[in-house]
Amino acid sequence: MSFFEGYRCGNCEREVPEGSLAGECPSCSGPLLGRYDLAMLRGSVTREEFLSAGAGIWRFRELLPPFRREISLGEGSTPMIDARRLAGKTGMKRLFIKDESANPTGSFKARGMAAAVTRAVDLGIRRAWMPSAGNAGLALSAYAASCGLAARIYVPESTPPGVAEECRAYGAEVVVCPGVLPDAAARMRSDMTGGGEVDLGTFREPCRVEGKKTIAFEIEDQLGGDSPDWIIFPTGGGTGIVAIWKAYREMEELGWLRGKRPGMIAVQSAGCAPVVRAIESGAAEIETWRNPETIAAGIRVPGSRAGRQILEGLRDTGGTAVAVADGDIISAAGMMAASSGVFPSPEGAAALAGLISLLGSGRVDPSDRVVLVNTAGWSRYRFMLDPFKGGPSVCR
Ligand SMILES: [Zn+2]
């Protein structure tokens, strides 16, 4: 039984029916967001039934669009780590790490891409293209390989070494482009011939948000309904912020939350902080950041196609956005690794650096319940291991 009612533009509210090939609003190019008959769902499924059955993202199918075949590589059901030593190091009473590095291809992108590739196959799409800073391209390549979809990934030349090779190993075509992510996206659009290629890029495809909502459902489940005060998420294109905010709104409307919705906190690098700038200036839109520079490739994203929704998600939950220096990201990576056993990606480390900054400013209290989302593991960034070389060894 499906409760899905189609998509609606987050900007102009234009409706797009299920089964449409449109990946963005046909009127204003705004992001399409899935709609559900929540009143009917509330009368049909209990919170406990929704959260209890099965594993992976498709266990939450009542709040996902329906498909003939649900494609999966085992994404979702990632660990929620009660990081007691790390909590002690930061002065927090409790601190949780939602470790998304346990997903297929090692990042949180698997959730959205499983759903997006499932929709693409359902719609009869044969060729999926995407610009990517790394993790999303890897996820698309792997899911495309699993079902015979032809994938092409446009990556900026600054993408971590190894990404292009691994995408090719999955059978994807890779086009390496000069510049940053928007330059790769522009090159992709100029290469499109209208020959059936479909853009699965961020907020060009509605199921990436829907699939990513499942992080929030798992957080609710794993913390036993004791919702965190804050969810701290490293933020590039902003799908994660929009998806978690949307999931919590749906759960709230369903009467499934026991407390209040968590505050959403976006963390960016000081060298690329368009969301932070918009929050601090009170802007209604996110203005593109010029010359983005940071070691954290996943958040080297100078703008977003869903600026209004990201800012609304942060403001609506009493959240905020904070920028951290690259040096603090490296320090936080080492701190998390040595104090929790989770060696985070630079983006995941940025979430910890953001928490430390917000504890310092008093915005987050040491007694608050905080979930840090580690979006990927460090291994993808092993070429940056220099900061962790040296020091004592057992064998000399
Ligand atoms: Zn629109």
Image (spheres, rainbow, N blue to C red):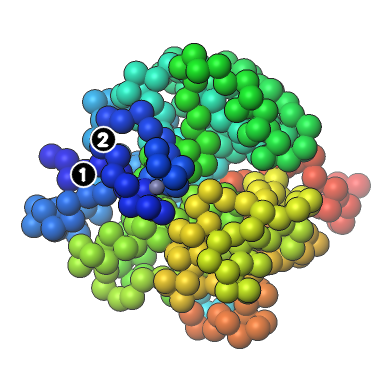
151 or 390, nearer to the observer: 151
Q: Are marks 1 and 2 in contact (CB under 8 Å)?
A: yes
Crowding at mark 1 (Cα within 10 Å: few <14, some 14-19, many 20+): some
**How far across and how far down the image is residue 9, in percent?**
36, 48
Left or right: 188 in relation to 17? right
The residue at the point 62 percent across, 51 percent down is 303
* Label 1: element kind: strand
In the rendered structure, which amino acid carries the disc numbered 2?
Answer: Glu
Horizontal and vertical percent position of residue 366: 55, 82
Check disc 2 and report its element: helix, strand or loop: loop
- Kind of residue at badge 1: Glu
In the displayed structure, 386 sits above or below 313; it is: above
Circle 1 residue: 5
Residue depicted at x 55% and y 16%: 193
**What number is the disc on residue 392?**
none
Residue 331 position (above or below residue 61)? below
User: Hey, which residue is sitting farthest left in the picture?
Assistant: 43
Q: Residue 200: x, y in percent?
A: 49, 32
Q: Is residue 252 left or right of residue 73?
A: left
Per the image, the residue denoted by label 2 is: 18
Separation (CA) of disc 1 from disc 2: 7 Å
